């Protein structure tokens, strides 16, 4: 099923953003302010995924404080839930922000996007297509026409899975939107044929439901692809250039730490994600790049263009905060 941008697609994205404004809670008093100790306070929305590890490492290891920042984290279940709050200045940045969503918003003129720092790149088994243990689906080619759950429609999960299947000469599935925490129950109830889950939900579904891996979502053309980042608006960068630069430096330092010491990430995960220390030790982690790379982002943009998720090329270089 080809993915095409259309007026109806634009309306669906607008409706999703409007609905997201209703489900984002706790952001009515966020935004930049000054703390009593002189540090600048930032509110950052984040998902409980391995993507957000550098954010929490930077906070807990004092890297934000070193930059004169006091960063407060607002948990969300989908990064798009935080977009209305970002536009209103109720949050200053979004961590683990799915690039696909935000490049689409930038193209539409909904968001004057700026990328503060890169989040993660796709690594083997950081996300997998899972099926019930007794499923009749035995190969990726069996997914053609089957119902597969993704967290957000027309996004990084379907983008990469479509590319992987195309490289294998296989047909596309039919996608159903189900939040990560509900994917395991949906699979148990046979509401979908498979789920495309990201860590730590990936491992949890395998453990709790007895699901098996049908396909490594980090393989083939998805390998090494930028998946998420730390995004904000051009207005925030103009108004708070020192805070933006300090935030970038702190995240980059934390990403270097995460890349050099995966155990630091595994120790951090139980603090913000619903994962035990034992479970964290066996998770498949993404790649934490030290700096954002426009060339790598162009790979993602090209893939989006090929699948009709963008109507024109975007040069990511001017969007990177330096």
Image (cartoon, helix red, strand yellow):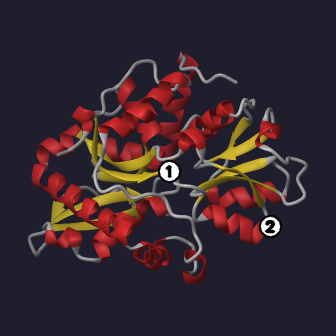
Q: Tally the numbered discs.
A: 2
How many residues crowd mark 2 within 10 Å: few (<14), some (14–19), many (20+)? some
Q: What element carries label 1?
A: loop
How many residues crowd mark 1 within 10 Å: few (<14), some (14–19), many (20+)? many
Percent of width and height locating residue 98:
46, 45
Percent of width and height locating residue 298:
38, 32
Q: From this view, report whether residue 207 is shown above or below residue 164.
A: below
Q: Is residue 176 left or right of residue 254?
A: right
Asked if labels 1 and 2 touch by Cβ distance under 8 angstroms, the answer is no
**Residue plotted at (75% across, 31% down):** 170
Q: Is residue 61 left or right of residue 179?
A: left
**Residue plotted at (65% across, 66% down):** 203
Query: Residue 208 appears in which quarter of the rendering?
Result: bottom right
Farthest bottom residue in view: 278
Q: Mark 2 points at which residue?
A: 210
Q: Mark 1 points at which residue?
A: 122
């Amino acid at each position: 099923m080809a993915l095409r941008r259309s007026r109806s697609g634009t309306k669906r994205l607008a409706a999703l953003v409007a609905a997201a404004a209703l489900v984002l809670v706790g952001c009515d008093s966020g935004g930049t302010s000054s703390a009593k100790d002189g540090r600048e306070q930032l509110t950052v929305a984040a998902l409980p995924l391995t993507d957000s590890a550098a954010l929490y490492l930077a906070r807990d290891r004092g890297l934000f404080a070193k930059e004169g920042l006091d960063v407060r984290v607002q948990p969300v279940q989908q990064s798009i839930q935080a977009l209305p709050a970002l536009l209103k200045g109720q949050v200053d940045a979004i961590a683990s922000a799915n690039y696909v969503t935000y490049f689409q918003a930038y193209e539409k003129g909904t968001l004057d996007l700026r990328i503060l720092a890169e989040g993660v790149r796709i690594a083997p088994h950081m996300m997998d297509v899972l099926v019930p243990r007794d499923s009749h689906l035995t190969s990726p080619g069996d997914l053609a026409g089957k119902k597969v759950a993704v967290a957000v429609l027309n996004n990084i999960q379907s983008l990469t899975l479509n590319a992987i299947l195309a490289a294998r000469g296989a047909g596309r599935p039919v996608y159903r939107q189900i939040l990560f925490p509900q994917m395991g129950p949906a699979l148990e109830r046979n509401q979908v044929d498979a789920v495309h889950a990201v860590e730590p939900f990936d491992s949890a579904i395998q453990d709790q439901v007895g699901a098996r891996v049908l396909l490594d979502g980090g393989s083939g053309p998805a390998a090494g692809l930028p998946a998420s980042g730390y995004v904000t608006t051009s207005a925030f960068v103009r108004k708070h250039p020192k805070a933006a630069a300090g935030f970038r430096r702190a995240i980059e330092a934390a990403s270097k730490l995460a890349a050099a010491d995966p155990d630091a990430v595994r120790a951090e995960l139980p603090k913000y994600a619903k994962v035990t220390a034992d479970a964290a030790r066996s998770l498949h982690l993404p790649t934490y790049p030290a700096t954002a790379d426009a060339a790598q982002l162009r790979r993602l943009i090209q893939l989006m263009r090929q699948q009709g998720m963008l109507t024109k090329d975007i040069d990511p270089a001017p969007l990177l905060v330096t």
